[in-house]
Amino acid sequence: MPKSFFLFICCVFTLLKPCIGFAWAFTEDFKQGFYWGSLPISFGKFVSSPADGELLSRLTDEAQQEWENQVGQEIWSVTPSYSTNAPGGNHIRWSNNFAAETGYDPNTTLAVTVRHASGTYFSKVEIILNGGNSALRSNTNNMLKKTILHELGHTVGLDHSQQYSIMGANLSGVSSLTFDDSQGINSAIDEIQYRQQIGYVSPLASESG
């Protein structure tokens, strides 16, 4: 009987000095064999207030393009505009009650990426932004753009890097993708495509009884 997995990746950005050490990494679920069954990943942008729509939409598009320039192919099929309807499917959105909704401290957490899997495949991904952080919401010092870049990396299976990079766990002066990020995304896409080609099934994808 296929199991359903609900996997949380918490991205806690701080103003600590970044660590220089190990490079990019895959998330635990990706290493355990869960992956996207097809690319690109359909992806929507949702806001409760139209006042938030233009900025979120533009920065999401910019972040998508920056990642895809690293691999030379489409990774996400992002809707051209934002929606104010109830979110469904793969999407990015603001949360106005971040602590209650995610269980994470809004004083230290900028965003959370939630990946769902059914069988061996990821079935849904959701990026939840901390709507109570005014600096994030207004993109002060490019904070929102960097956060979206970071969270999009998580959607395909990239974990935190200990390099000075977008995928580093701490908010830093890095405002665009680094060589470490490029290596990570290319490795993730190569692995996804390889698993798709051979029809790989995670050993954790099903259980009997």
Image: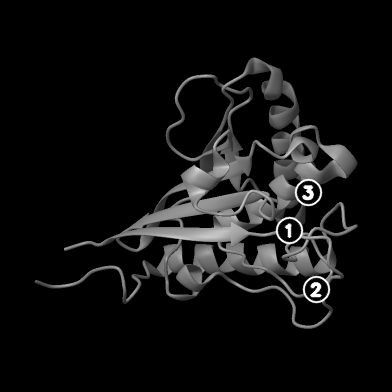
Disc 3 on helix, strand or loop? helix
Q: Which residue is the extreme one toward the top?
A: 50
Q: CA distance from mark 2 to mark 1?
A: 14 Å
Q: Which residue is mark 2?
A: 163
User: Which residue is painted at 50% across and 53% down in the image?
Assistant: 103
Viewer can see residue 40: no
Image quarter for residue 58?
Answer: top right
Q: Are marks 2 and 1 in contact (CB under 8 Å)?
A: no
Front in this rendered view, residue 23 or 129: 129
Q: CA distance from mark 1 to mark 3?
A: 10 Å
User: Which residue is painted at 74% across and 69% down in the image?
Assistant: 183
Q: N-terminal of the two: label 1 or label 3?
A: 1
**Of the residues shown, which amino acid type is indicated by label 3?**
Lys
Q: Which residue is mark 1?
A: 13
Q: Are marks 3 and 2 in contact (CB under 8 Å)?
A: no
Q: N-terminal of the two: label 3 or label 2?
A: 3
Disc 2 on helix, strand or loop? loop
Front in this rendered view, residue 15 or 192: 15
Quadrant showing the C terminus: bottom left
Image quarter for residue 145?
Answer: top right
Q: Please give left or right for residue 133 compared with residue 128 in the image.
A: right
Residue 107: image location, x then y, percent: 69, 51
> Residue 146's mark?
3
Residue 198: image location, x then y, percent: 40, 70
**Front disc: 1 or 3:** 1
Crowdedness near tag 2: few (<14), some (14–19) or many (≥20) residues, C-alpha within 10 Å: many
Residue 161: image location, x then y, percent: 72, 71
Q: N-terminal of the two: label 2 or label 1?
A: 1
Crowdedness near tag 3: few (<14), some (14–19) or many (≥20) residues, C-alpha within 10 Å: many
Q: Please give left or right for residue 130 compared with residue 191 in the image.
A: right
